[in-house]
Amino acid sequence: MRKILVIAGIVWMEMWRRKTLHVLGILLAATLLLLFSINISGLGRIPGYVKETGLLLTWLLGWIMGINIAVRQLPQEEKRGTVYAMLARPVGRGQLLLGKWLGAWLAATGAVLCFYALNVLIVGGFGGRFGAVALLQAVSLHGMLLAMITALAVALSVRLTQEAAAALSYIATAAMFAFVPRIPEFVAGAEGWRQTAMLILYTAMPHFELFDMRPRVVHLHGPIRWSTWALILLYGAMITTILLTAAWLAFRNRHFSRTAKD
Amino acid sequence: MNTAVDIRGLSVRFERGGSSVTALDRLDAVVPEGHVFGLLGPNGAGKTTLMHVLLGFLPPTAGQASIFGTDVRRAIARQRIGYLPEHPDTYRFLTARELLHTAGRLFGLRGRDLRSRSDALLERLDLTAAADRLAGTFSRGMLQRICLAQALINDPDLVILDEPTGGMDPFGRLRIREMIAELKARGKTVLLSSHELSEVELVCDTIAILYKGSVITAGSAAALVPAGESLERFFIRTIEAVDAGAADHAGKGAAHA
């Protein structure tokens, strides 16, 4: 575990030194303050509107950060050649993979936590409020969602270039958000084997929509039941484990000698 | 004398462009502890491939290799190894000191031991003044030295150096030579690949010439090279002899140091 944490530490240091979080935090704060100052048709005075926009931005920034950080880890190691020095130490490939994923996940989750805190501060500063328990549940589910997204990005980056893995990660995750919740509509209109295929697809695809508590948080509808919350977290952990196992199977026999000239 | 590296019947074949390429062909070699072993060979001979197998980057197609008695496919085999790659690079967003601490922690070092080793290596490789500078601001020579320092942080018993002096100025080459001599004096084993034949002749106890994935001749420079001939001339003559179909004459076979 110590080696995995050391590798994750490298990811955090890279993110910190490259000032990724600083730039995105400033962007989020600037956007939220702008929303208050523009006050088009009086909308800026409604805390719900600002909360909704702030949380949407937090989700978008978390999504972009999660994929961007995760997808570059292994390809950059190979491109720089640092993968050789890393694996020349008593570090297993599984440990390297887990360290990279953990680093990317916790970096993205840490950034998202900062964004939530910024939201609370800005909305609170203008007289709005969040339900504490619902917000806690929303943040934890968002963190688990980022675990799945970063695991998918890491898994794709094992065999693809950084650019291809990033593009595919964005397409796949966007499709999971937009398409999977709508599959039941198609199931109702289909018959025979098509209906069966869609049902299988609906069951097999990760359900990202389960992790989205934004409407409840914005409209102060209160928390969900803790048993439901725990089941969703368990489901997220299961999907993450499946994705990381697939990544490890692809990574464990990966040949790094292709750059060897002699 | 104990064995540091034991290679038996090692073969590596790749699929490249739809055809099978034999990078290593039933290689046998034994490197005793405390020896400086030089691997010579033209580009594509299989030197880096052999090092990559020893470091567990690449699984052999056939045969086996062990380091201090442990199969190279096990991560623990690398606990006693230090490795400097051919084109070393590192995390440029970390300082020299952070790089050494990170490398050390991966070997299970911590606390005062790690700090004292890092400080000693920074001093030994003339990097103390740059200890808290980001590696991204380093010159090429400094990068090479910090990568070397990382390779030595665990005080390895086997040091694998792949073209360590490539692109170095004469001072850098001298520093590497002195370091190899110092490692040997401390009883460490060094496996060195280089195109700098004069350098290999100076520092190596045993030289093996690798060509087309096989060791075609091996021994001490004094035993291999006839009087009055340079190692460079001997190397070229040996390779030409193999190309001319005189592989048997050149002494294809095991490399027992």
Image: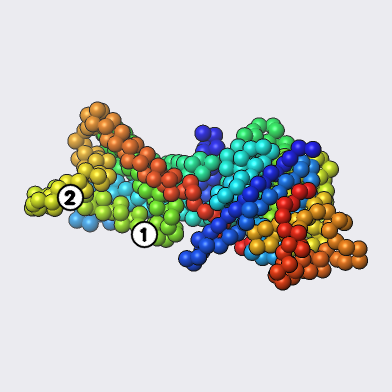
Looking at marks 1 and 2 on the same chain, the residue that comes earlier in the sequence is marked by 1
Q: Which chain letter goes with mark 1?
A: A
Q: Position of residue A52 (x, y in %)?
A: 25, 47
Q: Nearer the viewer, residue A114 or A153?
A: A153
Which of the image's four quarters has the C terminus of chain A?
Answer: bottom right
In three-dimensional space, the C-alpha distance between marks 1 and 2, rounded to whole angstroms, equals 26 Å
Residue A125 lies left or right of residue B214; in this view the side is left
Residue, x 77% and y 66% (percent of image)? B238
- Give the amino acid type for the residue marked by disc 2 in the picture: Ala
Residue A197 - label: 2
Q: Position of residue B57 (x, y in %)?
A: 57, 49
Q: Nearer the viewer, residue B181 or A124?
A: B181
Tag 1, which secondary structure? helix
Residue A167 - label: 1
Question: In the rendered image, is residue B93 in sight?
Answer: no
Q: Which chain letter goes with mark 2?
A: A
